[in-house]
């Protein structure tokens, strides 16, 4: 059981603002198709995963996408940069309900709801994917970086042919 | 007539952050299906209402849902917990455009736009309900609690068979 | 190439909060149909533009809507106020991923993702327009005002018959 939390201290409120700024920069890279920038939001040893909610809730580790380490993210980014042109589409990310869940030994746990909209040429804008980010951030110099991002999506009927990062 | 407001003082900006944290916790409870936690976000004498925008604008007090007092919210939560399993679905809440509208004798008036997406098994994610929260918060110890939440929805064509809280 | 930015200083975080408050007030005016209030969010010499993303990216200045100066915005608001009643609909704006991009000589550059949902009588709520605000704000007394707003939309299939402001 968990109800409303006590009013967060000002430091935590400011930390949430900082995380929101991170989401803003991260999503702008994806929305603008700067896929080569995407791995730069992660630590060298980062874990990135996209998993269906039904798998996550069943405790199944299988995922649509699984990357361990920035090198794998870079491989993925490179592969996508090459294939992307065959399926022109616009993506747009909306991140809301950002929550700071805790901080331990320099690792900040946070979560947020995301919505990715997709627009194909001459088609209406549609819901591509709705889900939740489960994140672990660390500081690297003045930056926040993702050490872990687990994207857990509700949307089971998605276009798996070209799995873009979220 | 009302245009842009003067820059809010820092205290009001921080209050908005605190309200956003409340929305984050409230929506996480609903998104995760923790319906038993839902009444805990309200005061004992709280008023909770879901009403169509056309009724609201016509000054008609009728609503899809009307609960007076936390006991009624708890009854509702209990009833939903029992029926929920017959209609498995994922919900996801997106709250944005949070506004602090004023504060009087310890009661904080605020509003926000909400969007609830729904995913049924093997179906695409769809818009379940779009609307606006009209809230009155009070402080109880270190917590914000809802004394009033009026959910005014735009979406007239909704699945009324199982009216979930928003 | 651009990855995560350094943690923004507190002043920039507070500025973003202020801009979010502006979006909240601006969108509330549009959502509530207070179209006459809309021009008041702009400076007298403001530029307002709605352009398709494909035109924007091709460097084509053509747009769906182009207004130079508040007087043109007021003309537009007046025209819309007269026609609006023939097509009753509810609009709802969701602004997220707000970014402060810089500040130069009192002009603040910012961007945000917007989503406009539309509900027509007896129809489900649908995605009307998804896009991005590219804004330049200035301070006028205690207020932020838009000197420039470029709305760049992804959604190519939109109801052009009645082009409402976003």
Image: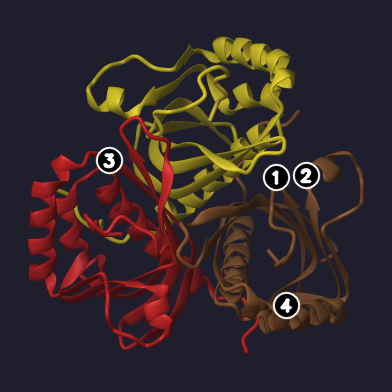
Chain colours: A red, B brown, C yellow
Comes first in the chain, label 1 or label 2: 2
Left or right relative to C9: residue B81: right
- Could you say which is closer to the camera, residue A134 or residue B36? B36
Q: Which mark is residue A89?
A: 3
* CA distance for labels 4 and 2: 24 Å
Q: Residue at x 31, y 88 (%)?
A: A105
- Kindly identify which chain the residue marked by label 4 belongs to: B
According to the picture, the residue beneath numbered tag 4 turns out to be B80
Q: Are marks 1 and 2 in contact (CB under 8 Å)?
A: yes
Label 4 residue SS: helix
- The x, y position of residue B79, in whole percent, is 77, 80
According to the picture, the residue beneath numbered tag 2 turns out to be B53
Q: Quadrant of residue C34?
A: top right
Q: Which residue is drawn at 72% across and 46% down?
A: B156
- Quarter of the image with the N terminus of chain B is top right
- Could you say which is closer to the camera, residue B15 or residue A1? A1
Q: Do marks 3 and 1 share a chain? A: no
Q: Residue at x 16, y 61 (%)?
A: A40
């Amino acid at each position: 059981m968990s109800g409303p939390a006590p009013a967060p201290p000002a430091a935590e409120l400011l930390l949430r603002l900082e995380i929101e700024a991170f989401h803003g920069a991260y999503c702008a890279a994806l929305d603008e198709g700067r896929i080569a920038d995407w791995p730069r939001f992660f630590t060298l040893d980062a874990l990135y995963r996209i998993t269906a909610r039904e798998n996550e809730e069943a405790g199944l580790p299988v995922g649509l996408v699984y990357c361990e380490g920035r090198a794998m993210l870079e491989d993925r980014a490179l592969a996508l940069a090459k294939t992307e042109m065959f399926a022109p589409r616009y993506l747009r990310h909306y991140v809301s309900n950002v929550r700071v869940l805790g901080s331990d030994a320099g690792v900040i746990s946070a979560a947020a709801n995301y919505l990715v909209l997709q627009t194909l040429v001459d088609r209406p804008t549609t819901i591509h994917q709705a889900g939740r980010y489960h994140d672990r951030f660390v500081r690297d110099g003045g930056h926040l970086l993702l050490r872990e991002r687990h994207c857990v999506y509700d949307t089971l009927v998605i276009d798996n042919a070209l799995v873009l990062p979220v």
